[in-house]
């Protein structure tokens, strides 16, 4: 509650230094966002190599309350079924790919018992921090098409198939 009061005091208050340090509201919101985030994984060498990413192995991936809320609202049944597996999907994906539309990195796991392909989309923020932004079940036919086109790459930790 104290954070909220502090933010409301900053909201709409012009700063003579805003052109130098940035908008106080945006800075305050970025700090709250950081405080609500949790590290849930990192980029492995195999993923970086497979996708030709220009980042270091071990670059962290976070999730914040807003990301979880988005997943729950946008794909409630998928989140209920697979939400607890997000970190595991990032750590051990069966497939990885890049989304051409938004540049996100896609970590996909196939669940053999029910034939579901579950995707966790990770995007980089304006502050160069990676967040798990979305998670949902993909259409199996679409996945097979992505695999055939090479858009999704089969991966095993420490080697690409």
Image: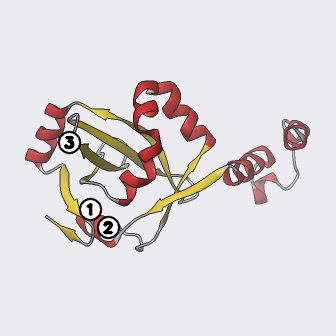
Q: Position of residue 111 (x, y in %)?
A: 25, 42
Check the image and tell me how it is coloured. secondary structure
Quarter of the image that includes the N terminus? top right
Query: How many discs mark residues in the rendered view?
Result: 3
**Picture residue at 85% right of the left edge, 44% below the top:** 3
Q: Is there CB contact under 8 Å for labels 2 and 1?
A: yes
Q: Quadrant of residue 119?
A: top left
Give me the disc on residue 48. 2
- Numbered disc in front, either 1 or 3: 3
Q: Say few, some or many: other residues with alpha carbon within 10 Å of mark 1 (under 14 / 14 to 19 / 20 or more).
A: some
Question: 51 or 108, which lies in front?
Answer: 108
Q: Where is residue 30 in the image (x, y as percent from the top left)?
A: 70, 50
**Left or right: where 49 falls relative to 17:** left
Label 1, label 3: how many angstroms apart (C-alpha)?
25 Å
Q: Name the residue under label 1.
A: 51
**Picture residue at 43% right of the left edge, 47% below the top:** 86
């Amino acid at each position: 509650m104290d954070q909220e009061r502090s933010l409301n005091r900053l909201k709409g208050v012009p700063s003579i230094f805003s052109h130098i340090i940035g908008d106080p509201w945006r800075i305050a919101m970025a700090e709250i966002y950081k405080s609500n985030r949790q590290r849930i994984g990192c980029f492995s060498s195999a993923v970086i190599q497979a996708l030709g990413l220009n980042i270091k192995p071990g670059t962290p991936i976070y999730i914040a309350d807003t990301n979880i809320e988005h997943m729950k609202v946008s794909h409630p049944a998928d989140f209920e079924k697979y939400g607890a597996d997000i970190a595991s999907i990032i750590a051990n994906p069966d497939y990885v790919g890049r989304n051409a539309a938004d540049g996100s990195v896609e970590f996909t796991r196939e669940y053999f018992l029910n034939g579901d392909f579950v995707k966790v989309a990770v995007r980089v923020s304006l502050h160069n921090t990676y967040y798990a932004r979305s998670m949902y079940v993909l259409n199996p036919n679409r996945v097979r098409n992505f695999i055939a086109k090479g858009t999704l790459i089969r991966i095993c930790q420490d080697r690409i198939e």
